[in-house]
């Protein structure tokens, strides 16, 4: 383990390293604080790493002349880093407020950068020009860059750390053959979710200085007394007076460099569930606890639940601000960030789960153990081991369970189901999905988090075919398109053939490489000299003998009807879809992946037997 309880740590990352009493930080955004470094100094780890990455991009050598344009917080840290590297440093700023401080940190020359001072800057380098210029200013003006071009030597280096104007003239770059680089925050790994969120480090021999290793290096420099941060702290505010600190930042009525927020020494118990200010509804209505309220839930599920005869009791999201906002918007009485408290709250009757895919299994399992009727957005689980655990727990506590397979509730598919309900022969179904492109680094494509699009999305269409046939799958065969060397294989453009117990045959074509101008879903059904076409939930055409009839629909995919059916069934102690149907949807998606990997047709009974043997064997 990298960390142990009681370790002192410094951390970074927008949305992670917040001014909260408790924070949850991915491992690559946190590092241990050396024993002789205090918390105040360690709080500069992220800012210092930004300065350090700028210095690394400049690649200064011992004895070189380097100019730093912008003597604010990052600029003054940059000066110290360059001196520690054995460079001769000049500092430039349009305001003289920090000149004396810059000189005390080792600047051999400070300048306001006006045209009359350029000769002094060049004289500092014996008229040869600076080997490198690091711009740490923040302005929309092009002046810092123009100044850098005048004072840098031929074949010199310019590195931009701050945000400055970049209307760059070509001539100086051409005449001096300059290198111009923009430093990316605090180093390699920044903005890479696989590095920052998933904790996948870059190999040490190939990427020596990642953002985490930059943070650690900066803390080590503090520990070795190479960096003085105490003199950079100009103001301290208690967390209770944080507004005053931000006023100082925005109003700029006095000079500041480093502003610290301080906290009390004693921790207070966290209030994990807070009232939203919404009064309780009338008695007798079932109380809903809702876990996860992202865009999908707020657009499709919560507006429907709000208008049903239920009481929205508590909502849980990852952040308190969002939880309170959602609670007030949709009328929940309470908001929380503790999702498990919803499941174990005796006042809550039904649990609804719309959180990230990798959390579904735990919340569903806990809900079944707590004997709470539970609705979960698809997918139910991400692997067979999780499915097996839920099946075993469900056998002990067969509570109402529903997975968000909404298409079977859409008016268009309900109409189609009625048309084929009197058949005496198997169906042949062709379901084409123009799914659209999702980048390979999107969370839904990650097998451990989103499950991939087969588990996370194709499950919808497997369930729809099961609904139309009233039958369970018995075999699966799948193929995906071939990938070129330039492509990252994601297995989300594929064709799937499913054979059902009643003899029906279904083909799902799930394509991610089509145009968004084309309708998303198109389903054809063939049976007993009849045919039907569902066109994107907007119409259903029936072909029989010499007649073609068409029925129009509103394009809705059944979310409203799904929520209504779920509440109605839960109130009666029932599930809208039987458990074996739910189980076989997940099992079929796992078989699709197995077929892609092996190139074989997968018989589901044999496949499940093999998976059970693996679990029993400890695999």
Image: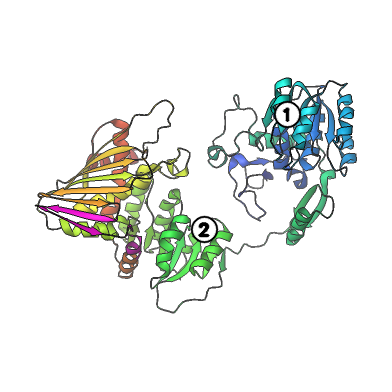
The x and y percentages for residue 557 are 33, 57
Q: Which residue is mark 1?
A: 158
Q: Which residues are magenta?
A: 536-563
Badge 2 density bin: few <14, some 14–19, many ≥20, Cα 10 Å: many
Tell whether position 559 is magenta.
Answer: yes
- Which residue is drawn at the image coordinates 79% and 32% (left, top)? 147
**Res. 106 in view:** no
Q: Which residue is mark 2?
A: 317
- Which residue is drawn at the image coordinates 54% and 55% (left, top)? 318
Q: Is residue 56 left or right of residue 108?
A: left
Would you place residue 385 above or below residue 150 in this image? below
Badge 1 density bin: few <14, some 14–19, many ≥20, Cα 10 Å: many
Would you place residue 556 above or below residue 448 in this image? below
**Res. 3 in view:** yes
* Kind of element beneath mark 2: loop
Q: Give the mark nearest the N terminus, 2 or 1.
A: 1
* Kind of element beneath mark 1: strand
């Amino acid at each position: 383990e990298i960390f142990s309880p009681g370790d002192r740590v410094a951390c970074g990352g927008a949305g992670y390293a917040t001014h909260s009493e408790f924070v949850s930080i991915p491992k690559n955004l946190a590092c241990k604080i050396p024993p002789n470094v205090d918390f105040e100094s360690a709080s500069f780890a992220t800012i210092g790493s930004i300065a350090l990455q700028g210095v690394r991009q400049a690649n200064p050598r011992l004895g070189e002349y380097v100019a730093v344009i912008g003597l604010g917080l990052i600029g003054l840290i940059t000066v110290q880093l360059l001196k520690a590297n054995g460079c001769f440093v000049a500092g430039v700023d349009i305001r003289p407020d920090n000149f004396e401080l810059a000189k005390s940190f080792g600047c051999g020359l400070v300048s306001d950068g006006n045209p009359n001072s350029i000769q002094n800057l060049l004289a500092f380098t014996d008229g040869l020009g600076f080997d490198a210029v690091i711009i740490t200013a923040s302005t929309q003006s092009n002046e810092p860059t123009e100044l850098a071009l005048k004072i840098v030597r031929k074949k010199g280096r310019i590195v931009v750390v701050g945000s400055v104007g970049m209307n760059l003239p070509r001539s100086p770059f051409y005449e001096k053959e300059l290198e111009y680089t923009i430093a990316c925050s605090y180093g390699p790994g920044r903005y890479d979710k696989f590095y920052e969120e998933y904790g996948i480090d870059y190999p040490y021999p190939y990427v020596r200085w990642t953002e985490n290793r930059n943070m650690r290096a900066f803390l080590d420099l503090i520990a070795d007394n190479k960096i003085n941060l105490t003199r950079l702290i100009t103001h301290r505010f208690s967390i209770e007076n944080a507004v005053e600190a931000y006023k100082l930042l925005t109003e700029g009525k006095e000079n500041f460099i480093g502003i610290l927020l301080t906290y009390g020494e004693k921790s207070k118990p966290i209030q994990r569930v807070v009232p939203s200010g919404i009064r309780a509804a009338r008695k007798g209505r079932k109380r809903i606890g809702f876990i996860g309220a992202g865009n999908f839930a707020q657009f499709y599920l919560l507006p429907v639940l709000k208008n049903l005869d239920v009481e929205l009791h508590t909502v849980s999201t990852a952040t308190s601000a969002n939880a309170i906002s959602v609670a007030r918007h949709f009328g929940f009485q309470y908001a929380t960030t503790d999702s498990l408290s919803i499941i174990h709250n005796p006042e809550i009757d039904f649990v609804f789960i719309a959180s990230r895919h990798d959390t579904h299994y735990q919340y569903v399992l806990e809900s079944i153990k707590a004997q709470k009727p539970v609705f979960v957005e698809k997918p139910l689980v991400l692997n067979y081991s999780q499915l097996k655990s839920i099946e075993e727990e469900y056998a002990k506590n067969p509570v109402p369970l529903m997975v968000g397979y909404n298409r079977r509730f859409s008016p268009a598919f309900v109409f189609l189901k009625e048309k084929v309900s009197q058949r005496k022969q198997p169906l042949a179904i062709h379901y084409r999905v123009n799914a659209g492109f999702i980048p390979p680094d999107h969370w839904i494509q990650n097998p451990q988090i989103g499950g991939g699009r087969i588990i996370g999305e194709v499950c919808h269409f497997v369930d729809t075919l099961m609904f139309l046939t009233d039958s369970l799958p018995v075999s699966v065969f799948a193929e995906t398109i071939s990938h070129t060397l330039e492509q990252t294989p994601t297995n989300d453009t594929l064709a799937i053939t499913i054979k059902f117990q009643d003899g029906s045959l279904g083909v799902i074509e799930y394509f991610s490489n089509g145009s968004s101008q084309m309708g998303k879903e198109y389903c054809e059904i063939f049976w007993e000299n009849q045919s039907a076409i569902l066109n994107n939930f907007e119409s259903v055409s029936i072909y029989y003998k010499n007649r073609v009839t068409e029925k129009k629909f509103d394009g809705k995919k059944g979310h409203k009807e799904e929520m209504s059916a779920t509440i109605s069934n839960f109130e009666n102690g029932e599930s809208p879809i039987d458990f074996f149907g739910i189980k076989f949807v997940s099992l079929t998606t796992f078989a699709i992946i197995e077929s892609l990997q092996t190139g074989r047709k997968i018989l589901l009974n044999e496949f499940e037997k093999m998976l059970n043997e693996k679990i029993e064997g400890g695999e």
